[in-house]
Amino acid sequence: MPTDPKPSWRHGEITQPVVDDYLYSMLPPRDEVLAEMESEAGKRKIPIVGPVVGRVLHQLALMINAKTVFEMGSAIGYSTIWWARAVGKDGRVFYTDGDRKNADEARGYFERAGVSDRITVRVGDALEILSEQKQEFDIIFNDIDKDDYPRAFRVAIPRLRKGGLFVTDNVLWSGRVTQKNPTEPTTKGILEFNRLLYGAKDLFTTILPIRDGVAIAVKR
Ligand SMILES: C[S@@+](CC[C@H](N)C(=O)[O-])C[C@H]1O[C@@H](n2cnc3c(N)ncnc32)[C@H](O)[C@@H]1O
């Protein structure tokens, strides 16, 4: 378990603090590998999704019996492990990150978690790697730099199968999406992205206001 009771990855500006504490207090303990990753992420301020959102990702994959997941922005592979455990032995998860050091660290965790055989690790621009894929995916998870979210939308949707899920983290951006005239490229990127999601005729979208906001869009 994380040593810090409120590590930075928890965010906490969306839900009332007492409700947030309750949600985290209800969680079953994680295995040794995920617990160590949570602890490391807290110490080194690595922005992982954490266990509340990790469970949502895992559950979504179970709900649609997903076998192929493409993850954009994987860092040390914390969210990747939640996906990999959900897709099972015959599933495949693509890990992508622009930082080779992250990928090397992630590989170590995948080995220890017993899921390395179902994960393809790719280093580079997640959007370029996704555009090169010929197959359609059951789930595409978007967690890259926020100013690039509109570009992620355009690349990801054609690569998603009908009935597949496009899942995105941080879509409430610590509440900054409510600013009247935002100037930060990150906030502007997220606002445009959320408009694209809700405006797309071939998608049905919901934003879950947990942690920093998770958007779930199903392709019709
Ligand atoms: C928020 S972290 C990902 C956390 C991870 N999804 C988790 O919850 O464990 C974002 C990561 O995306 C990577 N990144 C940002 N933009 C990227 C891009 N265009 N292509 C590949 N990786 C990118 C960064 O290096 C960083 O490690």
Image (tube, rainbow, N blue to C red):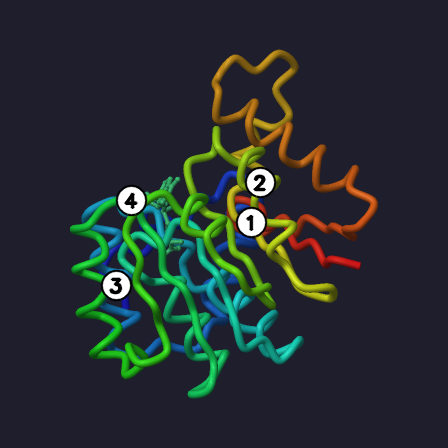
Query: Would you call the spot at circle 3 few (<14 residues within 10 Å), some (14-19), or many (20 or more)?
Result: many
Instruction: Residue under label 3, please give it.
Output: 37
Establish whether ligand 1 lies closer than 8 Å to the Cβ of label 1.
no
Q: Are marks 1 and 2 in contact (CB under 8 Å)?
A: yes
What amino acid type should be assigned to the residue bearing mark 1? Thr
What amino acid type should be assigned to the residue bearing mark 4? Gly
Establish whether ligand 1 lies closer than 8 Å to the Cβ of label 4.
yes
Distance from the alpha carbon under mark 2 to that under mark 3 = 23 Å
Measured as percent of width and height from the top left, residue 189 is found at 55, 27
Closer to us: mark 4 or mark 2?
Answer: 4
Give whichever of 28, 181 is nearer the camera.
Answer: 181
Closer to us: mark 3 or mark 4?
Answer: 4
Residue 98: mark: 4
Measured as percent of width and height from the top left, residue 18 is found at 53, 52
Please tell me which residue is depicted at 51% across the width and 42% down the height of the picture.
170
Secondary structure of the residue carrying tag 4 is: loop
The quadrant of the rendering that contains the C terminus is: bottom right
Residue 168: mark: 1
> In the rendered picture of this protein, how many numbered marks are placed on residues?
4
Distance from the alpha carbon under mark 1 to that under mark 4 = 18 Å
